[in-house]
Amino acid sequence: MKDKIGLILLAGGVGRRTQRKVPKQLLLVGGKPMLVHSLEKIEDIPQIASVVIPCADEAIEKTRYVLDAWGYDGAKYRIVEGGATRHESVSRGLSSLSGCDYVIIHEAARPFAAKADFLRLVEIEDRNATLGVPIPFTVAEVDKTGNLSGALDRSALVNVQLPQIFEYATLAAAHEKAAQAGRQYTEDASLLHDQLGVAVRIVEGSATNIKITYPSDLVIAESIYRSFVIGGADD
């Protein structure tokens, strides 16, 4: 079992794609801010000693208000200004953590990751791991003209989910190397493997662990909450 774990909870949304004036991590799902769903899952995991929440500068005060209102106002929780991209927000989160051997990365836009998901990453023997699920649909390559140029073997593909866990020093080194190369990534398992060739274990995820991006996702989220969370399937 791993100890001395920090967690970066990405909360950089400003509401553009969800078409809301409120940042999506603060939108209500099942009657509570999306951000709170994730915090509830990890608050009783003793190995997670500190939580850093990178968010947009204009959302810092609203995020702090939500944390205070829901009782997450202790020294364990810190809000920092995120970057212009997800990649930059992770880098800033890493810089804000200290004394951690491992780091879990999650995003507030995935409110239905279960506590069991976090515990599996804490307990797994592999040093670097991410949730993932098989891709149930066909994925094709497209050329620069917009025409189909090839088909990918979906049996060799995976839909990467969060949370993810990494050795802190290894991930920090991968981010430093990516910065020197001028590269940015949309998630960190790919970054780690691409920059350092480090193996990342795929841990079975869940179809209900959706990322909320568009207005229709909020409708789906309410259905998942009623059917799986209230129904008791989400542990």
Image (cartoon, helix red, strand yellow):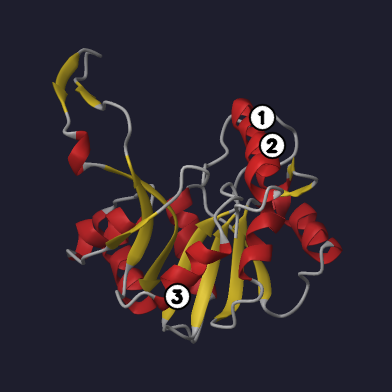
The extreme right residue here reads: 69
Q: Residues within 10 Å of mark 1 (few under 14, many from 20)?
A: few
Secondary element under disc 3, as helix, strand or loop, is helix
Q: Which residue is mark 1?
A: 219
Q: Position of residue 1 (x, y in %)?
A: 41, 84
Amino acid on which the number 1 mark rests in the picture? Val
Q: Are marks 1 and 2 in contact (CB under 8 Å)?
A: yes
Q: Which mark is residue 60?
A: none
User: Label 3: few (<14), some or many (≥20) within 10 Å?
Assistant: many
Residue furthest out toward the left = 150
Q: Is residue 149 left or right of residue 119?
A: left
Is residue 93 visible in this depiction of the protein?
A: no
Q: Residue at x 29, y 51 (%)?
A: 183
Identify which residue, 82 or 50, lies in the foreground.
50
Q: In the figure, is residue 31 to the left or right of 193?
A: right
Please name the residue that numbered disc 2 is placed on. Answer: 222
Amino acid at pointer 3: Val
Q: Which residue is mark 3?
A: 122
Residue pictured at 59% horizontal, 68% vertical: 52
